[in-house]
Image (spheres, rainbow, N blue to C red):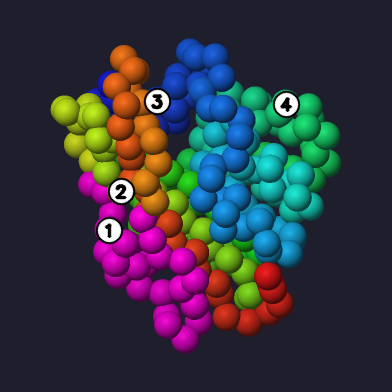
Amino acid sequence: MHPTPSSDPAAFWEARYRDSGRVWSGRPNGPLVREVEGLRPGRALDLGCGEGGDAVWLASRGWQVTGVDISPTALERAAAHAAEAGVGERTTWERHELGRTFPEGTFDLINVEYLQSPVALDQDGVLHRAAGAVAPGGTLLIVLHGGWPSWQDEPPFEAEFPTLDGLLARLALPEEEWVLETKETLRRPSTSPDGAEGYREDHVWRLRRVGGGAAV
């Protein structure tokens, strides 16, 4: 699917899921597992949850999870996944067009995995609201693609990828309120649709809000 500048985000993402079978593997993202596995469970918010792989994994570890996505079809699949995994009672699903609406309340963990879009998305605005919704002692985990896959000769659309320091500068979180616990680039294998082997780099930021007792 090749978006156009006028693509409506809600229509684009709903078509992305509605017109396909399962889009994602259902497994949690690797950086989430590595960065969060040792945290004490509490209330978690998964932004752009898709079909629920991360949210279901968190719920299976004892977190009470709110999953958010713009696509009703994605949310239906996520709820079905949670029910099949036996964690339906620990998951809640909300539809939001992030940048316009945002879940209420505060959370001990906010997971932002690959919240990047070929159609309109106020990424900075969403990340600022996410930071504001982290409870004292809680964790903000952000994982974003750092660039196109190595096998991508011609990018399918224009995109701006963040740098490790650039994103932190854009967030401008008060140093007295936040501790930066992870800032690194991970490289993982990536295979093109026609089978070309390569890699993709992802940037990972884990920040802890000062105060409270979200101990490891």
Give the alpha-carbon distance from disc 1 to disc 2, as whole Å. 7 Å
Q: Is residue 19 left or right of residue 198?
A: right
* Disc 1 residue type (three-letter): Thr
Q: Are marks 1 and 2 in contact (CB under 8 Å)?
A: yes
Lower position in the chain sequence, tag 3 or tag 2: 3
Which of marks 1 and 4 precedes in the sequence? 4
**Mark 4 closeness class: few <14, some 14–19, many ≥20 residues within 10 Å:** some
Q: Is residue 93 above or below residue 197?
A: below
Residue for point 48% across, 47% down: 113
Q: Is residue 182 magenta?
A: yes
* Residue 127 or residue 167, whichever sits in front: 167
Instruction: Point out which mark residue 35 bears.
Output: none
Q: Which mark is residue 80?
A: 4
Residue type beneath disc 3: Phe
Kindly check if marks 3 and 1 are in contact, taking CB atoms under 8 A apart as contact: no
> Which residue matches tag 1?
163
Residue 47 part of the magenta-drawn span: no
Assign a secondary structure to mark 2: loop
Residue neighbourhood size for the residue with mark 3, other residues' Cα within 10 Å, grouped as few (<14), some (14–19), many (≥20): some
Give x and y (percent) for residue 15: 45, 19
The relative height of residue 22 versus residue 40 in the rendered view (above or below) is above
What residue would you read off at disc 2? 146
Q: Amino acid at mark 2?
A: Gly
Q: In the rendered image, is residue 24 in sight?
A: yes
- Residue numbers of the magenta segment: 160-185
For the residues labelled 4 and 1, the Cα–Cα distance comes to 36 Å
Image quadrant in which you'd find residue 16: top left
Type of amino acid under label 4? Ala
Which residue matches tag 3?
A: 12
Q: Nearer the viewer, mark 3 or mark 1?
A: 1
Asked if 198 appears above or below 143 in the picture, the reply is above
